Image (cartoon, helix red, strand yellow):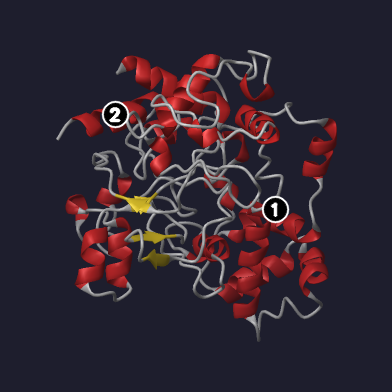
Amino acid sequence: MKKLIFLLAGFILVSVLFIGGFRSTAFAQEAEKISSLELLGKAIFFDTDLSVNGAQSCATCHAPEVGWTGPDSQVNLGTVVYQGALPNHFGNRKPPASGYAGDSPVLFFDEGAGEWVGGMFWDGRATGEILGDPLAEQAQGPFLNPLEQAIPNAQVLCIRIKQADYAGLFKEVWGDRSLDCAKDSAGVYERIGRSVAAYERSAEVNPFSSKFDIFWDNAVMAGKDVSKIKFSGGGGMGSGMGPGGGGIADPNRWQNFRNLGLAAFNDPSRANCASCHSIEPGSAGYPLFTSFTYDNVGMPKNPDNPFYTMPEVWNPDGADFVDYGLGGFLKGAGYPEVVYQQELGKMKVPSLRNVDLHASEDFVKAYGHNGYFKSLEDIILFYSWRGLTP
């Protein structure tokens, strides 16, 4: 068991997180290019003035240096849930990573697989049905959420944008009449969401520059199928491929033990991580390590979650609060019991991209929708133990 966990951690730690310096200079220069729309989205993303008191931006909870999730090691180690712009205002979940999220489709029920797919947020409530883009709808949410950036309404948000030093860029991108706060605050709100989503889809946020991506490129060029690397055999490159497999000869770039971790990751008879954290390529040609589906994995309750002590107006259940995830959203959205009942407790399968990107060696990241686990090894152990224990 310990060996399996070590192998999986070795594969995930080094291969899936962002690592600079492995792409060619030409690729790096291309990745640095950013369109006007993406630049506008970036300005909005990092603007703390787009909160009720100027205390919080999107990046406060989704910071690039830690893989676009929570950047405060002490918060991750303790309460996990990040305080909103207003003191003592807390939501109920860990910030999901905002990078590598743009492929998630509009929420739908896959009749063949019998499962919900797509949407954004842990519970899928940013369905994408309104704007046709779940990522843009998710980007809108925190600005007006009283437990997050707490702007009172879209018109006030529009005024803040109009006062920003990038207001000219906004009009350049969306047109001279695109910031009419009196008559078209809803339209401005939509443009804000789409701008942030454009940045979140940019090469700056999604560089595909890990060691795994180099490995993937070489495998593709060699006509090899990375998904076939399993302990149980199969086609493709097989489970015994050494450091030189797929055209990679430098052991510092892709070592054999990572192949063993990948074999366990893929193999249904071993860890079978790929059944949810799919290794199928996304729109950019690289795996996103998620199926965009929802699962209830039996995550333990996190007693340090500050939402349990939030006032009744926010949490009427107090310490008895149960996070029903997708099922809770579907119930609140008016779906019949026969639909939502079987989805209770399910959370969206996160991407494993940047899953262990740290700001420093002693930085703590939290794992799971409530951040119960404090290391990658611990959550892998949980999954492994859970699979062996009834």
Quadrant placement of the C terminus: top left
Image marks 1 and 2: residues in contact by CB distance under 8 Å:
no
Residue at the image position 55 percent from the left and 51 percent from the top: 101
Q: Which mark is residue 298?
A: none
Residue at the image position 53 percent from the left and 45 percent from the top: 280
Q: Distance of mark 1 from mark 2, alpha carbons? A: 39 Å
The residue wearing badge 2 is 384
Question: Type of residue at label 2?
Answer: Ser
Compare residues 81 and 97 and report the one nearer the observer.
97
Q: Which mark is residue 42?
A: 1
Residue 104 percent coordinates (x, y): 52, 57
Residue 223 percent coordinates (x, y): 65, 35
Quadrant placement of the N terminus: top left
Q: Mark 1: which secondary structure? A: helix
Residue 123 percent coordinates (x, y): 37, 58
For label 1, the crowd category at 10 Å Cα-Cα, with few meaning under 14, some 14 to 19 and many 20 or more, is many
Q: Tell me: residue 315, above or below residue 179.
A: above
Compare residues 222 and 214 and report the one nearer the observer.
222
Residue 355 at least partly seen: no
Is 234 left or right of 215, judged from the image as shown? left
Residue 212 percent coordinates (x, y): 60, 30
Question: Farthest residue toward the left?
Answer: 390
Q: Tell me: residue 212, above or below residue 94.
A: above
Residue at the image position 25 percent from the left and 49 percent from the top: 308
Is 187 left or right of 145, judged from the image as shown? right
Residue 166 at least partly seen: yes
Location of residue 78 (image quadrant) = top left
Location of residue 67 (image quadrant) = top right
